[in-house]
Image (tube, rainbow, N blue to C red):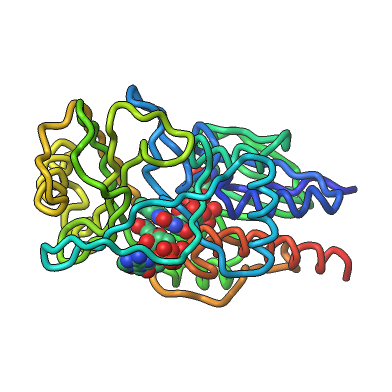
């Protein structure tokens, strides 16, 4: 008997794996605890429009990823972002243009994952809490105690701390996954009634609680009003203020931004804070993907390679290859 393959996580890694398995003729069933796809590439719908609070853009170094990127561009899911880039260090703001090509989902980051999901079957708002072995096949249980299955294989495509818990049925695999720690990041969005008087579209920041600031509405496909900025705190500051109440996070990062940006910054008319508990993996691992193929349990995500969109997509491809190879053997 063949049953579908369960994929937990509809971030770019899970969708990359799902797409490759689906293209190979296998049936997949996706699950995500969020209300939509994207994970750390998701865009939050707010009263000031959709905001990219996680990944700001992605770059492309791998040939296979480059091919996929061209297809996504041709389908209109992504566009090149050509920001006026700056660099801020020791309180000095300087233009910092370069030759790097940077891509973004359009009209919002999650347009890419929505396109990749297509019509594959998915269950959102479904937090999987357990992956357990039924009579002969894998079953999943969600936070409400509802069971799903049977499945022939399970691919866990979540950040490593969440994946380690879900993979408890394969202790060796779970312990490798658990060895990758992930750092948190606070992200804040601020809107101003009048556009700020600055040429900056995006800025890499050092010597500040912030590591990045960008004009969300300056990106292709986004509405131009109101002037909304996304600020991301570095992991060190975030760790220190992990449990700070959101209003205070907004106030502190607003202050750091006003100090850095070099123009008058009025009081924002809108503010929002989001904490990414598992923002960025610590270190780069060259794993591609991890598996206990004999058990039928697989894991992928940015934490298997580089902590970037490209690494996550490549990891999804690697897990699909592993699974297909095992089925063929
Ligand atoms: C603030 C920030 C800025 C970033 N900026 C950039 C950038 O500019 N460029 C770049 O290349 N990368 C950037 N990154 C990194 C990039 O976002 C990630 O590398 C990439 O999106 C990870 O994809 P993923 O599929 O591995 O994981 P995720 O996107 O985290 O997807 C995992 C999915 O699993 C779901 N999930 C988790 N647990 C469960 C469960 N128990 N049950 C069901 N579903 C579950 C989650 O809801 C999520 O949708 C940034 C990350 C952050 C946090
Ligand atoms: N949790 C998080 O906040 C993040 C997790 C993972 C990645 N994050 C940031 O994403 C971008 C993307 O990295 P990349 O794809 O390698 O892009 P890059 O533009 O080549 O940037 C790499 C790195 O180089 C520095 N840099 C690049 N261009 C410039 C420039 N013109 N001036 C100054 N500095 C530049 C910069 O430090 C970049 O970090 C990347 O920003 C990750 O930090 C966040």
| Residue 192 higher or lower than 254, as above or below | above
Q: Is residue 316 left or right of residue 125?
A: right
Residue 162 can be seen, yes or no: no
Please give the name of the residue rendered at 16% of the width and 48% of the height, measured from the top-left corner.
257
Q: In this view, does 136 lie above or below 325?
A: above
Vertical placement of 245 versus 132: above or below?
Answer: above
Quadrant for the C terminus in the image: bottom right
| Residue 201 shown left or right of residue 323 in the figure | left
Label total for image: 0
Residue 299 location (% of width, % of height): 61, 61
| Residue at image point 70% right, 60% down | 67
User: Of 77 and 292, which appears nearest the observer?
Assistant: 77
For ligand 2, the image quadrant comes to bottom left
Residue 218 visible (yes or no):
yes
In-image side of 77 versus 38 (left or right): right
Q: Residue at x 16, y 47 (%)?
A: 253
Q: Dividing the picture into quarters, in which one does residue 272 lie?
A: top left
Estimate the x, y position of residue 26 in percent, counting from the top left. Answer: 83, 49
Residue 119 versus residue 130 in the image, above or below: above
Q: Nearer the viewer, residue 267 or 303?
A: 267
Q: Position of residue 196 (x, y in %)?
A: 20, 38
In front here: 174 or 186? Answer: 186
Residue 61: % across, % down: 57, 69
The residue at 40%/28% (across/down) is 223
């Amino acid at each position: 008997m063949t049953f579908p393959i369960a994929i937990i996580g509809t971030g770019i890694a899970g969708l990359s794996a799902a797409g490759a398995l689906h293209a190979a003729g296998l049936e997949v069933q996706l699950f995500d605890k969020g209300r939509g796809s994207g994970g750390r590439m998701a865009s939050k719908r707010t009263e000031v429009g959709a905001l990219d609070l996680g990944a700001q853009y992605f770059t492309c170094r791998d040939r296979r990823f480059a091919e996929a990127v061209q297809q996504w561009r041709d389908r209109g899911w992504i566009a090149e972002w050509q920001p006026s880039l700056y660099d801020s260090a020791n309180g000095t703001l300087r233009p910092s243009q370069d030759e790097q090509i940077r891509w973004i989902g359009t009209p919002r980051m999650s347009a890419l994952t929505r396109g990749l999901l297509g019509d594959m079957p998915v269950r959102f708002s479904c937090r999987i809490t357990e992956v357990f072995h039924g009579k002969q096949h894998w079953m999943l249980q969600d936070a409400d105690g509802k069971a799903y299955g049977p499945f022939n294989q399970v691919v866990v495509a979540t950040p490593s701390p969440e994946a380690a818990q879900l993979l408890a049925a394969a202790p060796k695999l779970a312990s490798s996954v658990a060895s990758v720690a992930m750092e948190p990041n606070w992200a804040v969005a601020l809107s101003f009634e009048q556009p700020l008087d600055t040429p900056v579209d995006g800025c890499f920041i050092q010597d500040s609680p912030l590591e990045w600031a960008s004009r969300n509405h300056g990106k292709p496909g986004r509405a131009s009003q109101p002037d909304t900025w996304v600020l991301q705190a570095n992991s060190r500051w975030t760790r220190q203020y992990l449990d700070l109440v959101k209003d205070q996070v907004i106030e502190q990062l607003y202050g750091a931004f006003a100090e850095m940006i070099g123009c008058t910054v009025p009081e924002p008319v809108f503010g929002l804070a989001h904490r990414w508990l598992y923002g960025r993996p610590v270190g780069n691992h060259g794993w591609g993907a991890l598996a206990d193929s004999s058990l039928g349990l697989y894991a992928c995500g940015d934490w298997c390679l580089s902590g970037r969109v490209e690494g996550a997509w490549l990891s999804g491809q690697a897990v699909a290859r592993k699974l297909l190879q095992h089925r063929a053997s």
